[in-house]
Image: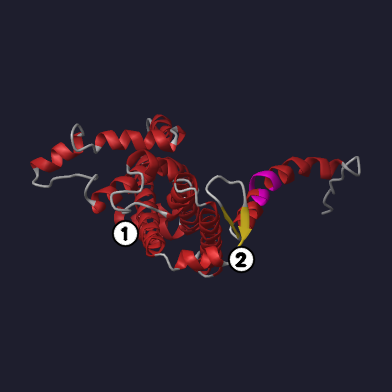
Amino acid sequence: MQTKRMTFPGRWLPYALLAPQVIVTLIFFIWPSLQALYMSLLREDAFGLSSTFVGLANFARLFADDTYLDSLSVTAVFAIGTTLLSMAAALLLAATVNRMLRSRNAYTTLLVWPYAIAPAIAGVLWWFIFNPSIGIVPYALEMLGYRWNHRTSGADAMMLVIIAAAWKQIAYNFLFFLAGLQSIPQSLIEAAAIDGAGPVKRFWTIVFPLLSPTTFFLMVVNVVYAMFDTFGVIHATTQGGPSQATNTLVYKVYADGFVGMNLGSSAAQSVVLMAIVIALTVVQFRYIERRVNY
């Protein structure tokens, strides 16, 4: 069977179609990345009137700073907690909706709505819910004997930002998990049910292994989300406190660059953050993907 080959009527038409995407990538990704790399080699005064080339001094000072090393561990805890919580909750909701015969579309629409909320608004929403003075959750926890206060407790603050960030990402994960569940042949599940396998065993032995490509993709996306897109949540809830307990790498870039006016150190931190995310992505695709069955 001979396949039909698609051709463009003009020589420059393919380049014209690719030009918008290339221009957007150059302006909003390549150019800022190169600018951050260049600024990380400079030391500017507080007024931004002059700059001095210092080479790798900003990076050396960065890794000698205990607060920056602490932010690395804080970011690791935050990224792992956000990824696990958002993916687990989304998988549970997707499995529940997938078993529904009626009102599936209505529940799907309602569960997707939180994804349209801005991160800062999501942070403010959960800040009110967990507010020690007027929040309903601290009131319920106090009745159980636990006094919640994310203003003074670093563990409470970390739990707050993880819940807020994970809630924002649940809708995104839910859509992909639901699509993955609907693509699994029902004949396999029915055959396992005939053999006597219960719902839990069918899920862990048939459904979950077949969801491994979707799970792997969402793991990569959620790690990148926790590294880069959670600034608004942290800024609206804890602002990196208390005592730097929620001062993640992306928030420290803002705090040092725009609050402390240390642009060289802030640029060096952004370069390190980008390198960490690239390294994690490479490791995930090179080693973890081998365990994924497509």
Callout 1: SS? helix
Contact (Cβ within 8 Å) of mark 1 with mark 2: no
Q: Position of residue 293 (x, y in %)?
A: 51, 64
> Which residue is nearer to you in this view: 24 or 133?
133
Quarter of the view holding residue 77 = bottom left
Q: Position of residue 168 (x, y in %)?
A: 40, 41
- Which sits earlier in the primary sequence, circle 1 or circle 2? 2
Residue flagged by tag 1: what amino acid is it? Lys
Report if residue 20 is visible in the image.
yes
> Which residue is nearer to you in this view: 28 or 139?
28
**Which segment did they paint magenta?**
26-31
Q: Position of residue 208 (x, y in %)?
A: 41, 57
For the residues labelled 1 and 2, the Cα–Cα distance comes to 58 Å
Q: Position of residue 66 (x, y in %)?
A: 37, 65
Q: Check residue 211 for magenta coloring.
A: no
Callout 2: SS? loop
Identify residue for label 2: 55
Picture quarter with the C terminus: bottom right
Identify residue for label 1: 201
Within 10 Å of disc 1 (Cα), the crowding (few <14, some 14-19, many 20+) is few
- Pair 1/2: label in front: 2
Picture quarter with the N terminus: bottom right
Give left or right: position of 27 versus 258. Answer: right
Give the vertical position of 49 relative to 77 (above or below): above
